[in-house]
């Protein structure tokens, strides 16, 4: 969904401005822009209709362990959202 991708990219921009570094790798950001890819799952956490966090799980390599990236909006940190996304990632592996 292009609107969801734009919302995630906006969240990443705000987090990078707050943290002074990118929370998601360039490869991860390309996957957000590029749409569907087998073995890659996206997790969006919304609170009060706004995107509060995002996680990405890549399980495309039969030899390597799954890789995950996770970010919570700076204004929503400290409320258990990262823990909830982490639990969703673990449940999906």
Image (tube, rainbow, N blue to C red):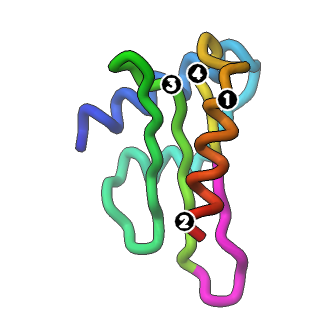
Residue at left offset 56%, top offset 59%: 57
Q: Tell me if mark 4 has few (under 14), some (14-19) or many (20+) residues whose alpha carbon lies within 10 angstroms of its own.
A: many
Mark 1–mark 2 Cα distance, whole angstroms, equals 18 Å
Q: Which residue is mark 2?
A: 92
> What span is in magenta?
61-69
| Residue identified by numbered label 3 | 52
Q: CA distance from mark 2 to mark 3?
A: 20 Å
Number of other residues with Cα within 10 Å of mark 3, as a class: few under 14, some 14 to 19, many 20 or more:
many
Q: Nearer the viewer, residue 77 or 9?
A: 77
Residue 73 sits in quarter: top right
Compute the Cα span from label 2 to label 4: 22 Å
Foreground disc of the pair 2, 4: 2
Seen in the picture, residue 18 relative to 47 is either above or below; the reply is: above
Per the image, label 3 sits on a secondary structure element best described as strand
Rendered position, 63 above or below 37: below
Q: Are marks 3 and 4 in contact (CB under 8 Å)?
A: yes
Residue at image point 39% right, 73% down: 38
Give the CA distance from mark 4 to mark 1.
Answer: 12 Å
Q: Magenta stretch: residue 9 in it?
A: no
Q: Which mark is residue 73?
A: 4
Specify which label sits upstream in the sequence, 2 or 4: 4
Total marks in image: 4
For mark 1, what is the residue?
80
- Asked if the residue under mark 3 is in contact with the one under mark 2, i.e. CB atoms within 8 Å, the reply is no
Quadrant for the N terminus in the image: top left
Other-residue count near label 2 (Cα within 10 Å), few / some / many at <14 / 14–19 / ≥20: few
Q: Residue at left 61%, top 11%? A: 75
């Amino acid at each position: 969904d292009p609107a969801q991708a734009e919302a995630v990219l906006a969240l990443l921009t705000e987090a990078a401005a707050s943290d002074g570094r990118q929370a998601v790798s360039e490869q991860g950001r390309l996957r957000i822009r590029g749409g569907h890819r087998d073995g890659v799952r996206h997790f969006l956490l919304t609170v009060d209709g706004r995107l509060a966090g995002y996680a990405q799980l890549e399980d495309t390599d039969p030899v390597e362990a799954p890789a995950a990236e996770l970010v919570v909006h700076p204004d929503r940190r400290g409320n258990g959202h990262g823990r909830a996304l982490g639990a969703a990632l673990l449940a999906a592996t």
